[in-house]
Amino acid sequence: MTANQAPGADPARRAQDLFDVRERVCLVTGASSGLGAGFAQVLVDNGAFVIGLSLDAPQDDPGGEGFVHLRGDVRNDDDIAGAVALATDRFGRLDVLVNNAGSFGVAKASRQGRDDFADMLNVNVAASAEVCRRAHAVMRRNPRGGSIINVTSVLARLPIRGLSAYGAGKAALEQLTRALALEWAPDAVRVNALAPGWYRTAMTRDYLDRGLASILTGQIPVGRLGEGGDLAGPLLLLASDASRYITGTTFTVDGGYSVRS
């Protein structure tokens, strides 16, 4: 061991071992389509056991024995509890939560009433917080702790017309991520956020197809919208031991959109 090497560090550890998620037990909310389906597929393809929780049945089943899907709503505490219980009953633990389920809608702030605003925050903040809380309750009993990955958005920090409620909710989720990371670090439960930029998903497709895609492409430094595979690396980083010393951080994956001049 060199003078600058930390105790227990293994500088020769191979990348494939460092990012290994084989047999990790993962819960992915909003796993039926879009980014959530992509997250579930990446984890299954890399040997993880994945439980999906979504309102609808998956459009594309990741296949194999490594994926189980539950129909449920993250706004319903019983549905959340059922998904967590499935993980613990079947595998004895929960290692990773990908807190992806969310609500997206375009509305001018001047026309958005209290109830509409509250509904958006209920899904994007309150429900996400409850999923985190229930995941933490079982992860803290896991000898190796756990990793919570909250899926936010670049719009948590970049205001855009028509998305005030969505942006406010994602900003709150990023602050919640930092607060939970601070509180739960002693339990070996890491909490980080993954902030995608503009991707073509079921939630955004209609808006992008109306001409928004061409406008955004001109604003994104790398010159294209995001693709599902762009998130695979950051996901595996946060789900594996490669991020064992990372908590309270937001990883932005947006092709440079958030740093454009």
Image: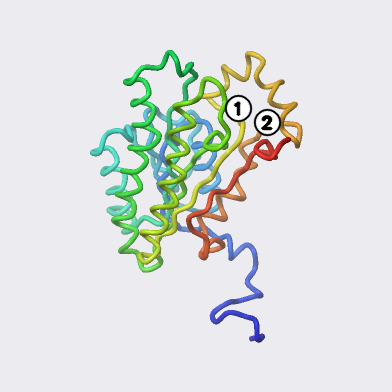
The residue shown at (54%, 49%) is: 250
Examine the rendered structure and indicate whether residue 213 appears above or below residue 39.
above
Examine the rendered structure and indicate whether residue 7 appears above or below residue 70.
below
Residue at which label 1 appears: 200
- Tell me how far mark 2 sits from mark 1, CA to CA: 7 Å
Image mark for residue 123? none
Q: Secondary structure at mark 2?
A: loop
Q: Quadrant of residue 56?
A: top left
Q: Earlier in the sequence, mark 2 or mark 1?
A: 1
The residue carrying pointer 1 sits among few (fewer than 14), some (14 to 19) or many (20 or more) residues within 10 Å by Cα, namely some
Residue at which label 2 appears: 225
Q: Position of residue 254 (x, y in %)?
A: 64, 39
Quarter holding the N terminus? Answer: bottom right
Q: Position of residue 259 (x, y in %)?
A: 69, 40
The type of residue carrying mark 1 is Arg
Q: Position of residue 125 (x, y in %)?
A: 38, 37
| 197 horizontally vs 174: left or right | right
The type of residue carrying mark 2 is Leu
Q: Secondary structure at mark 1?
A: loop
- Tags 2 and 1 touching, CB below 8 Å: yes
Examine the rendered structure and indicate whether residue 182 appears above or below residue 221.
below
| 38 horizontally vs 212: left or right | left
Which residue in the rendered view is the most extreme toward the front?
A: 110
Quarter holding the C terminus? Answer: top right
Which residue in the rendered view is the most extreme toward the left?
A: 78
The residue carrying pointer 2 sits among few (fewer than 14), some (14 to 19) or many (20 or more) residues within 10 Å by Cα, namely many
